[in-house]
Image (cartoon, grey):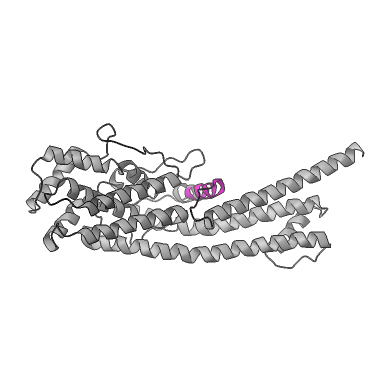
Amino acid sequence: MSPTILSDVILRCLTIAAGISLVVFTLNSAVRTFVLPRGENTWLTRRIFRAMLIVFTIGFQSKTYEQRDRRMAMFAPVTLLVMPVVWIFLVMFGYAMIYWALDVRPFSDALTLSGSSLLTLGTVPFINFPLTLIEFTEATIGLGLTALLISYLPAMYSAFSQREAIVTMLDVRAGNPPSVTTFISRLHSIRGLTNLRDMWATYEQWFVYIDETHTSLGPLTFFRSPKAGRSWVTAAGAILDTASFITSTVDIPREPQAELCIRAGYIALRDIASFFRIQHNLDPHFPTDPISISQDEFDEVYDELAAAGVPLKPDREQAWNDFAGWRVNYDAVLIRLAALTMAPYAPWSSDRSQPLIRRRGRIY
């Protein structure tokens, strides 16, 4: 075999291998993003989200939060629609490389054949039987990617609807933006603070639900609430802070269900933070690990609730240490998720967060 023929064979084999690798790489990203129950933040998905985030945050500047909120409300839906387009293009390009290596020349003809096969247009006639078999596999992949998107969107919006039901319910109890002071004072005046077991159980189930959905349906994290001032992140913060404050500071019998709710909450937030590769301490302790809330802020809420007639423990210093001991479990991840999602203003959460820096291929 002459050197020229040998080099041509090697080039064809390398091109076919590269095309197959690109197709497999793309399908792996699609399956891990849309199908795999545990969900994985794949490299390609991160790149797509990062590019779209740059477009939405840098490409379109906003002077007010309301303008930014309206713009960012489109971020997740648009990115979700862009992902299949990117996958389809990469699969089309990968198959075009295979066709080119199999003598469909020039490359523009190979790309046309690939697009016709992938999108099942039928605009290019069959050339020979081996190529026809390859075209069939490409057409199957194209239909599969379309079916994935069609089946994925209803699951996404169903999970979104269930998540937002609790967020809206919290608006009634904790105000908008939600705050510990409003939440506890309303509970105290309307139903009392000693019979909240069912409420904490409901919130525990909600945390378990968002843990499962926001790690298996990653883009759901960025879906914003229908009402501009609401956010699942600030709602989670208000629930956890209220449960922590009642457990540590309010002078009522111990409620184990509230403590279980706190644990379910910080586990959920940590899992979501890990999914997005947000660094955080897996075993924080106060006071060696500081929290973002100062003792003066705690004392301010303490005084407001005392003035509202809420029974509070007399040892304020011990109450602060106990509250901080609960808060340290979710403080860092709460603040960073608020920054990641650009959550609306809410005390003790998004009011002290800054947009996360985009680096090393991460989406934030």
Q: Looking at this view, name the residue that lies furthest to the bottom.
A: 122
Q: Position of residue 134 (x, y in %)?
A: 75, 59
**Quarter-of-image position of residue 288:** top left
Q: Position of residue 11 (x, y in %)?
A: 80, 42
| Residue 52 belongs to the span the image colors magenta | yes
Q: Looking at this view, name the residue that lies furthest to the top.
A: 288
Q: How many numbered marks, from 0 up?
A: 0
102 shown above or below 133: above
Relative placement, left or right, of 322 versus 207 is: left
| Residue 258 belongs to the span the image colors magenta | no
Say whether residue 24 is visible.
Answer: yes
Quadrant where the N terminus sits is top right
For the point 55% across and 45% down, the residue is: 43
The magenta stretch spans which residues? Answer: 38-53
- Name the residue nearer the viewer: 171 or 201: 201
Say whether residue 231 is visible.
Answer: no
Relative placement, left or right, of 90 versus 7 is: left
Quadrant where the C terminus sits is top left
For the point 17% across and 42% down, the residue is: 298
- Name the residue nearer the viewer: 205 or 272: 205
For the point 24% across and 33% down, the residue is: 287
4 shown above or below 103: above
Relative placement, left or right, of 93 versus 151 is: right
Q: Position of residue 61 (x, y in %)?
A: 42, 49
- Name the residue nearer the viewer: 161 or 48: 161
Q: Main secondary structure of the magenta part?
A: helix
Q: Position of residue 118 (x, y in %)?
A: 68, 62
Relative placement, left or right, of 261 versus 24 is: left
